[in-house]
Image (cartoon, helix red, strand yellow):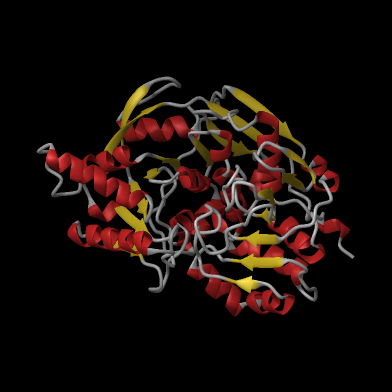
Amino acid sequence: MNITEKILARASGKSSISPGDVTFANVDKVMMHDVSGPGVIKVFEKLQKQGIDTEKLWDPSRVWVAEDHFVPSAEKISAENISKLTAFVKKYNIGRHFRYGMGQYGICHTISHEEAMVMPGDVYVGGDSHTNTTGALGAFACGLGHTDIAYVLLHGRIWFRVPETYYFHLDAKLPDHIMAKDLILHIIGEIGTDGGAYRAMQFGGPGIDAMSVQSRLTLCNMTTEAGAKCGIVEPDQKTIQYLESRGATNINPVTGDADAQYAKRFEYEAEKLEPLVAEPFSPENTKPVREAPTVELDKSYIGSCTGAKYEDLVAVARILKGRKVRIRTEILPAAISIYRRAMENGLLSIFLDAGATIGPPTCGACCGAHMGVLAKDEICISTTNRNFPGRMGHVESQTYLASPLVAAASAVTGKITDPRDLP
């Protein structure tokens, strides 16, 4: 069995399972945020009206809650949703509540690894489609809808159809001008936004071994844009060290068998990869940056669970140091722990000296809700994961997806720019 199959088999109490099997699996961790949480609360209210007991969660210690999408609150409904979520946390004695403006908080898919909330071998579900991100730690991680999350909260288990697995092999370490974002955009450009539909996308090979855990997180994050059930990387010593540095103990990794089977295998040569952009209006509309249209940009957005990890900010600082931005540039670290580290190591000063604006951890602009949405006809280059019509604001705005290096280089020139072409 491969790693996805082994995790699901163990969680289901079975010695083996195969793609296509339907199995009930025990869940190790579950997450809600300020958008999915209120939806789950509505499901609880409906169940109560039907006479179903919802007074007790299966295990509050395995539940955690983040405030990230509509923080700081953009309007009254957002503020009320935060209040509802807070009351739910108190009622059910959920100890892990990452509250906006109170110490450590941030984007849920960043908190999951920054706070070592998920371990290798876990079955982890969240009320958000980009829960796939955390599969980079060697966990089976996937997003679920409100009703399914409510069921997990009450019962601690949920059914899955075991996905078949596509294996993506990278032959060598990425060149300095290439980031994990370029690789995953290349993959999505090749297989399409439905190419991973209800499949596990597993990444491996010498190039993945050479990657940092943070880069692997970028890969798994955007498996969602390929329609995948999950993204996953087998845990190694880097994974263990990463989690231990964040306080994790008793780590018990799961790895696939030597003769594990995959539905399809894809091969990539690191030296042949180019910095890419995904043009509007799909993550699969990829092309090399040097072939991108010469358009005047209005904004460069460096943020989100995809592109504002500490490693991403270091890459941005490498470009912006000693330079000035020519367009509106917003940089939002993905968690307060990352914000603090960037401050202590001088990155924030580099950003400010370049003329950029630094904001708090929030999903607001990424999902087109607040904190810097795009106006009609505005064009943005962004480190986020989606560029559908209206994703970051007005339905007639345009978003080009790119790596932090490309987004920073483009901020300096005001047009889509390969970092190798900066003066």
Q: Nearer the viewer, residue 52 or 202?
A: 52
Which residue is located at x 69 percent, y 61 percent?
299
Image height of 225 relative to 215, above or below: above
- Residue 61: x, y in percent? 26, 55
**Left or right position of 418 against 132:** right
Q: Nearer the viewer, residue 253 or 328?
A: 328
Quarter of the image with the C terminus is bottom right
The answer to which image quadrant residue 410 occupies is bottom right
- Residue 367: x, y in percent? 52, 52
Image height of 409 relative to 271, above or below: below
Image height of 85 relative to 347, above or below: above
Q: Residue furthest right?
A: 423
Q: Residue furthest front?
A: 376
The answer to which image quadrant residue 287 occupies is top right
Q: Is residue 170 visible?
A: no
- Residue 177: x, y in percent? 79, 54
- Residue 97: x, y in percent? 32, 63
Q: Is residue 82 visible?
A: yes
